[in-house]
Image (tube, rainbow, N blue to C red):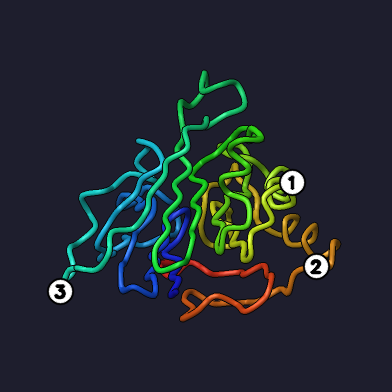
Amino acid sequence: MEITYIGHACFLIRFSTGLSVCFDPYSKGSVPGLAEADVIADEVYCSHSHGDHNDHGSVGTPENPYEGPAPEVEVISTFHDDVRGAKRGKNNITIVKAGGETVVHMGDIGCDLTAEQADKIKGCDLLLIPVGGFYTIDCKKAYEICLLTDPKTVVPMHYSGDSFGYDVISGREEFVSLIKSRGDREIIYGGSSTESLPSGKSLLLMEPLRIL
């Protein structure tokens, strides 16, 4: 599995089958400090309708589209806030399974998981989870979800850095510190792209590809 962190909550995943999937492409100019996403993928999944997660039309089609087995896709309906969507509406968690690999993109989740929802995510190969707070769960809540679902590899997203992201959301530092304190995951710095998942249980720290 190849993973490329475009930025914000946008990822390009290429499964071992050859299928390429883009999650949550953001519209041009919607995320401070990030250049246009400029992604090409076979399939696109968007967690909700906000412009920084839903620019489906900007994703190009591959010159040689994927023709292999169709992936298994499950969407779990959650909320973008902790008041059942009253502030920011609904959010979708997207689970994609292909070639024996399972990727879970949490979108802009802002609420707790039910026991049934957690069971569907538990033990996935790759969990992409927001940590920045304000619009989503914060670092502490993201850590709790990781303990609950025990993914093989977890990648934090939707956080701010020195030159990118929204002012009202935090960085990922507290999340990293909480993971380190438990001591059961290897901390790996993966840059913007990695050609394969780590072999063991890990926290994979990636940097946005499209920083201006």
Name the amino acid type tagged 1.
Glu
- Left or right: residue 159 compared with residue 95: right
> Tag on residue 144?
1
Q: What secondary structure is marked by label 3?
A: loop
Q: Position of residue 123 (x, y in %)?
A: 63, 57
Q: What secondary structure is marked by label 2?
A: loop
Say which label, 2 or 1, has the lower sequence index: 1
Instruction: Classify 10 Å Cα crowding around label 3: few (below 14), some (14-19), many (20 and above).
Output: few
Disc 3 to disc 2: CB gap under 8 Å: no
Residue drawn at the location 27% of the way across and 64% of the way down: 69
Instruction: Classify 10 Å Cα crowding around label 2: few (below 14), some (14-19), many (20 and above).
Output: few
* Residue 119, placed above or below residue 201: above
Quarter holding the C terminus is bottom left
Say which label, 3 or 2, has the lower sequence index: 3
Say which label, 3 or 1, has the lower sequence index: 3
Q: Position of residue 70 (x, y in %)?
A: 28, 59
Distance from disc 3 to disc 1, alpha carbons, whole Å, reads 41 Å
Q: Position of residue 105 (x, y in %)?
A: 49, 51
Q: How many marks?
A: 3
Q: Which residue is mark 2?
A: 184
Residue drawn at the location 50% of the way across and 53% of the way down: 104
Name the amino acid type tagged 2.
Asp
Q: Which picture quadrant has residue 205? A: bottom right
> Tag on residue 64?
3
Q: Which picture quadrant has residue 117? A: top right
* Residue 202, placed above or below residue 196: above
